[in-house]
Amino acid sequence: MYATIYRETFVSRMKSFAASGGWSDEQLFLLFDHLEVEEQGSGVERKFDISLLFEWETYDSPDEWLELNSQQADPTNFSDYDNPEWDDIRNHGKEVLAHSSTSEGVVLVR
């Protein structure tokens, strides 16, 4: 049995779990929107599960991603290393969820 979950409910439930520490409301909204689009595209409903968070990492900006991942990242993959955009991280083979209205984003770990 499945029930419809709305954005605000998704965010409040995720924030009630200790595992969501470090996730902003905006980042949880990004994840919810992505999962909703994924469901609509596949026609398969997803079960609400806190483990969804473990597939993603949160970043406050593309610069933070570069700083934390500079040991693994090959800077030649980025079109402008000094002024990175989320698209540059996508060029590194990562799935990135980001809104143009904020610098925050979430990056798929796998």
Image (cartoon, rainbow, N blue to C red):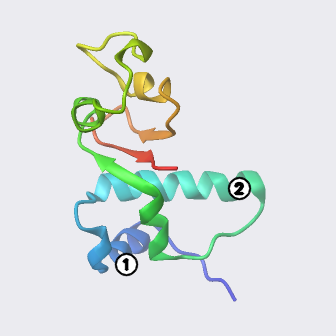
- As drawn, the label of residue 46 is none
Quadrant position of residue 103: top left
In x, y percent, where is residue 39?
A: 68, 59
10 Å crowding of disc 1: few (<14), some (14-19), many (20+): some
Horizontal side, residue 56 vs residue 35: left or right: left
Mark closer to the chain start, 1 or 2:
1
Q: Which residue is at a point 34% across and 22% down the rendered structure image?
A: 85
Q: Name the residue under label 1.
A: 13
Quarter the N terminus occupies: bottom right
- Residue at which label 2 appears: 40
Amino acid type of the residue that numbered disc 2 sits on in the rendered structure: Gln
Considering the numbered disc 2 on the image, is that residue within a helix, a strand or a loop? helix
Question: At numbered mark 1, what does the secondary structure look like: helix, strand or loop?
Answer: helix
Give whichever of 101, 46 is nearer the camera. 46
In the image, what residue occupies the spot 23% across and 29% down? Answer: 63
Tell whether 58 sits left or right of 6: left
